[in-house]
Image (cartoon, rainbow, N blue to C red):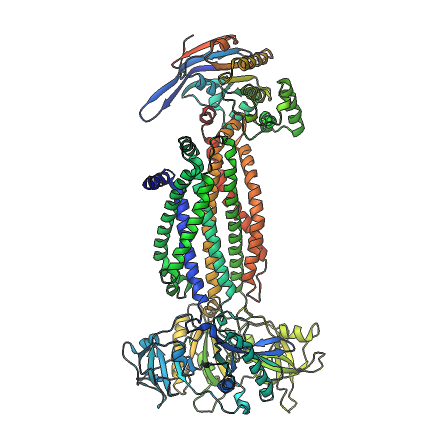
Amino acid sequence: MIELKDLSKIYRTETIETTALNSINLHIPKGSYIAIKGPSGCGKSTLLNILGLMDRPSQGEVILDGKKAATLSEKERNRMRRSLIGFVFQKFNLISSLTVFENVELPLLYQKLNAASRKSKVEAMLKQLGLEARAKHFPHQLSGGQQQRVALARCVINDPELILADEPTGNLDSTNGEEVMRLLTELHKDGRTIVMVTHDDKYAGYAKTVINLSDGNIVG
Amino acid sequence: MTIQHVKLALREASKQKLSFLIAILGMAISFAAVAHLLSYSLYYLNYDRQVDNPQEWYRLRLTELHPDFGELNSSGFFVQTAGMLLKDIPEVSEYLLYDTIDLQFNLSCDDKPFPMNQRTYVTQNFSEHYKLKIVYGNPDSIFANPRNLILSQSYATRLFGDVNPVGKEVFAGPRAIFQIAGVFADLPENLHLRNDIYSTVDYESDNATEDEVWYWLRHVRVRIPDREAVAVVQSKLDAMLAKYQPLMQRENPMQVRLDPITKIHFTTGLRDDAPAMSILIVYAVLALGLIILIAALFNFLMIISLSWQKRNDEFYFRRALGAGRFELFVQMAWEYAVYFFISVLLSIGLYAATLGIFNDLVQIDTLSYALFRMPYLAYTGGALVLLGTISGILMSWRHARIKLDQPEWHQFHKHRGNQVLLCVQMIISFALVSMALSVTQQYAFIRNWDWGWDGKNTVQYCYLTLPNSQIPGYYDSTVLRQRIREIPGVLKESASRVNTISTSLYSHRGFFEVPILLEDSSQHSPSHAYRCSLPPDFFRTRAVTLLAGTVPDHETDTEVLINDTFARQYFGSQSPLGKKLRLDIDEEADKWSQIVGVVPDLRFFPAHQEMVPIIYHLKPMVYEYYQVSWKPGHKQQVLSSLEELFADVVKQGMLGYTSQEVEHAQVEFYAQDRIYMNLSLSLALFVVLLAMMGIYAVSYASIYAQMKDISIRKVCGAEFSDLIRLYFKKYLYLFLGSGFVGLILAFNLARLYADRFSVKATGAWLSYPLTIIIMAFVVFLPLYINILKAYKADAIRYLQAD
């Protein structure tokens, strides 16, 4: 599903050059569950952002679902993000002025689905995640675990094949962390490809494959 | 601490250079613009107030109650009887008479031509009335002799340089008829009775029963120290008018009105007065000033408010470190004061630098009313301090309200405040843009108004001649016309008794209001119309096509033409051709004239005036106006030949001549309307720029504050068009709401302007859709730019940020 060839990412300022990723070669087959591990600043999130078409490499190639990312226009990248990829962040990244329902509905809105379909899909998803009673609440009225569940609901509402999770448990206590990991595991069982960034061995253990990253290089 | 606050204010301004430049410069420009507009308004609002106790002086105005036309107002009163009548009214403590003769004489002084297009007769107290500063001559005797001429300093300098002209004699041919007795320092420009040449004459008659004294209507002003006595004076004068009416040859009841002289410059609709200024324009200019000030102030408040909102964290920390609301208020108030003070300083510089430019632009003496002069300086200073203090206190107190336990999302109410400011600014922009476009459209329509006769490339000479004259001193009009036609480069020439570029319907300009009798008319008789005299060839020469009938090929007394208004007013749908009317209804002779043609409504007077029923008499007894058109490229040649011709012609008589280009005169008619249009347009442009900058600043702040939301939406697959839709929708409500209110406001403001004209621009509604298009750019272009910038920003930065 994902092929990274000789991928590098270098950040440059006037005086400093920082290599975040250094000639990474990686193949992520469809249906895999990968955890990327490593200390802070090793390039985990950069790698995830490149995989999610949110960032561009300085060098090398990203082939996503058979398409070379470098050749995609901004519109095509948007389209791929919308239909193929789902994101989960450490800080949930819910829109504070939208309700739970509206937050989950967001990807469907951009898929130009009609209101009735959106409503039934969102309601089903909220029910599946036990959030139906919270549909009209705003994010600040929810606990951290509930917020992350809403973020997960938003992530999978458009049925993406690839889920990119950036430290999804980083802001949660262990109970809620376990709950999120359980949900991710279920999503994997449904056939989705999951790439998760974490620095916690316990949560990395949920993945089928663990990749260790250090100073921008894959070390194991 | 204070120095710390000032330093911080300057530091913040330097950090957000563009925003503060917009706020401070916008405010400074608006202050300077408002100061100019105030000077402009003060010039007019001080009209005729240069006398002691101006509120005690009134002009007498004669009003005739006409059965057809309603009230016919004249600016004058029976000048010869005024003094006599007023002696019987003890409530009147003083009076002043004034009469301008605009007959041109062929005069000379020191063997050089002495141009005297206008001479003003005044009573001897005129000097004291306006406190004339006598430069040359004996102040006690300058008005002692009717032969004396008193000249303005600028006029005397133009004719004699720096030489004292007192004692010089003015000749008509070989005879000395005047002597220059004095020179006075120029009077202020905003005087109703301002002129360059004055002389005195004793108008007073001691016998009110002489019917000839009940004839001339001229400017008469009286002083009534007791305001309560004004009604008494009016009733006494009304009683006198009723008593002497049989001597006046006026069949309609008459009344006198007492116009306060501080308002006469704004009294419109008089038949025989100089063009007046519309008080509505003065008020509209003041309103424009207020609008500009509000727009700039709101822009200023908005940008400062946004800059404080950006520094929310800093204020939270200060609160956490022990600062109370009052301490924050003091800090903010100081910062506000610094910005306001810089604006004021900058505006003073701008105002001083543009004083001369504005004075030249509006062509009136605004320098005398510059706000640097006392007492205006004190008022302006006070107003600025008040404005700065109130706005500063309100703003700072509101923004200093920061609670530590207040969640961040609660801060959105401050954005709402900005939305309100933005909404008001947009209403103002809508109103001003729409009004400026509407006013421009109306002005362009009036300026390009088809006057009904071809006056392009034409100059009009005014010189009194007689047809086939054998009378010594009067030139033969037939010979003069022939000589004009022989000038190389002349395309066409015409002549008339009536002034074809008149500023008003006034008998001196060849229009005579006459009673008429209509034969076979269901209308009650006698009726009234205006008569003017033109030779039959005028219509052909000036490309006037008749609506009905024909123009006789010879001068005639028994056949007349009427204008379209006359035909519609007196004949309705019937054809007036062949109908008869009588002009001299008091004459015993049964002298009827037949209507042989209907002329379109020709305009020989400005578009402010309603069209009146006009009868064209086709046998002028005198020819006073000559219209000469030149072939393309022959202007200079024709004009210099005409000057030579008229200089030669006047040698034979005592009358002089004047000339004026027709198109130039038309432009002059609308000078104030043009200035108002230019002011509206430039102020609209300024407000639009302010609005654009304000919207840019507000949308930038609002989008900047939502960068995380935008990034989330991008991650969820939002495209640029989705973001555009999202934000445009928010501003669309603002656009529609402010547009609705602004356009209603504009409609009413523009109507004030358009109502001055008796003719209205067709398709005047065009300004409204045009405004909507312009404002759509003003609102959505800055928004578009900000959304594009936000869309192109690095989403990851915001998604990972706390």
Q: Position of residue A71 (x, y in %)?
A: 48, 23
Along the line of sight, the residue nearer the viewer: B238 or B718: B238
Q: Is residue B536 visible?
A: no
Q: Is residue B462 visible?
A: yes
Q: Residue at the spot x=42%, y=55% of the render?
A: B383
Along the line of sight, the residue nearer the viewer: B440 or B125: B125
Q: Count of labels shown?
A: 0
Quarter holding the N terminus of chain B?
Answer: top left
Residue lying farthest left? B163
Q: Quadrant of residue B553?
A: bottom right
Q: Position of residue A204 (x, y in %)?
A: 49, 10
Compared with B790, B233 (above or below) is below
Q: Position of residue B387 (x, y in %)?
A: 43, 51
Compared with B601, A133 (above or below) is above
Along the line of sight, the residue nearer the viewer: B753 or B574: B753
Compared with B210, B350 (above or below) is above
Q: Quadrant of residue A126?
A: top right
Q: Quadrant of residue B182?
A: bottom left
Q: Position of residue B483 (x, y in %)?
A: 44, 81
Compared with A179, B1 (above or below) is below
Along the line of sight, the residue nearer the viewer: B230 or B515: B230
